[in-house]
Image (tube, rainbow, N blue to C red):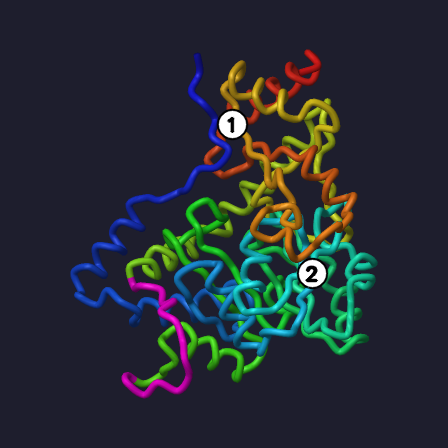
Amino acid sequence: MPDLIPAAKPLIGDDERAAVDRVLRSGMIAQGPEVAAFEREFAAHFVGGRETVAVNSGTSGLHLGLLACGVGPGDEVIVPSFTFAATGNSVALTGATPVFADIDPVSFTLDVASVEAAITPRTRAIMPVHLYGHPADMVRLGALAERHGLMLFEDAAQAHGAKLQGRPVGSFGSFTMFSLYPTKNMTSGEGGMVTAGNPEIARMLRLLRNQGMERQYENEIVGFNARMTDLHAAIGRVQLTKVDAWTQKRRDNAAFLDAHLSGVITPVVADGAHHVYHQYTVRVPEGRDGFVRALREEHQVGSGVYYPIPNHRLPSLAGYAPGLDLPQTERAASEVVSLPVHPSLSDDDLERIVEAVTAVTGAGA
């Protein structure tokens, strides 16, 4: 039996190991010069030099970004329900209320009409997610936010290098979070990057991540320990030199799957969108769970379901959304499957994935 093709595969090589060894030998392990260099290099690479702050996780980045923008008790922030729970969690952790809106069925990102219907006098901001690496409709969401006097934030955890109309994600909102978790398009082992729309937000992010101080023992506000270590930053700096080639391989893999898959509904890319394919997500309108099981058990092809339970139905967040009906979100949660698209795939792997999907859908699993 062939080896399993994994749904995701972190890429850590000798260059990353050498970078970690270099930091260990230096004795500077906590937040230091590697973090500062990583912030500059990440900003230049992805967001046109917009000021960027490194933190210890993507979730911390969302939480601190919201706090830095003044979100707190009494506020509402409109978010998608079809995403990882960290998006809604981060709003709740500030004391504000996450308000869940429906998604566009094509892009899986926030539906502008649903967002507009969810606006109330308490709404402070809109926070779309660039899900699977496809940018949300930031042009229309930005116009909506401006019309209602709202802030706009970006959850770009899965979207390093994605663009809309030639403009990079991370350059639209008052703040943007990029995750550096191991299975993302690039990693630092663990961590997050937050881009800031102005110097005041950037300074507040730096205070919040470091116990409320910029200078040692001069605590200005109550803050957290959300610092990134130099060990993690060293890994991230190496990955920055490789991520563009990896992203192109993801896009090439996605193009192959687009051209050869049948029996499933393949992803659609919106006009003007540059998709970076953190996930290659298809729809299986009937028998999704059997499809996933057959791929793995009969063909040794891994996959993932992101996400089977919408946020507004999770026990942790359902209290914020009693009786809420989000039909496109529910439909997506019951149909989506993410197939392998990562840059470690060989030509033989891609052909096996196509053959497996064809066999399983032909068998009516």
Which of the two residues, 164 or 309, is positioned nearer the viewer here?
309
Q: Percent x, y for residue 179?
A: 49, 56
From the top left corner, tell me how far across and down residue 284 is, in percent: 70, 28
Of residues 312 and 153, the one drawn nearer to the viewer in this rendering: 312
Whether the magenta-drawn stretch holds residue 138 is answered as no
Magenta span: 216-230
Q: CA distance from mark 1 to mark 2?
A: 33 Å
Q: Quadrant of the C terminus?
A: top right
Q: Label for residue 249?
A: none
The structure residue drawn at horizontal position 32% and vertical position 59%, both measured from the top left corner, is: 234
> Mark 1–mark 2 contact, CB under 8 Å?
no
Tell me if 335 is positioned left or right of 251 in this view.
Answer: right
Q: Which residue is mark 2?
A: 99
Q: Is residue 219 magenta?
A: yes
User: Label 2 amino acid?
Assistant: Val
The residue carrying mark 1 is: 302
Q: Secondary structure at mark 1?
A: loop
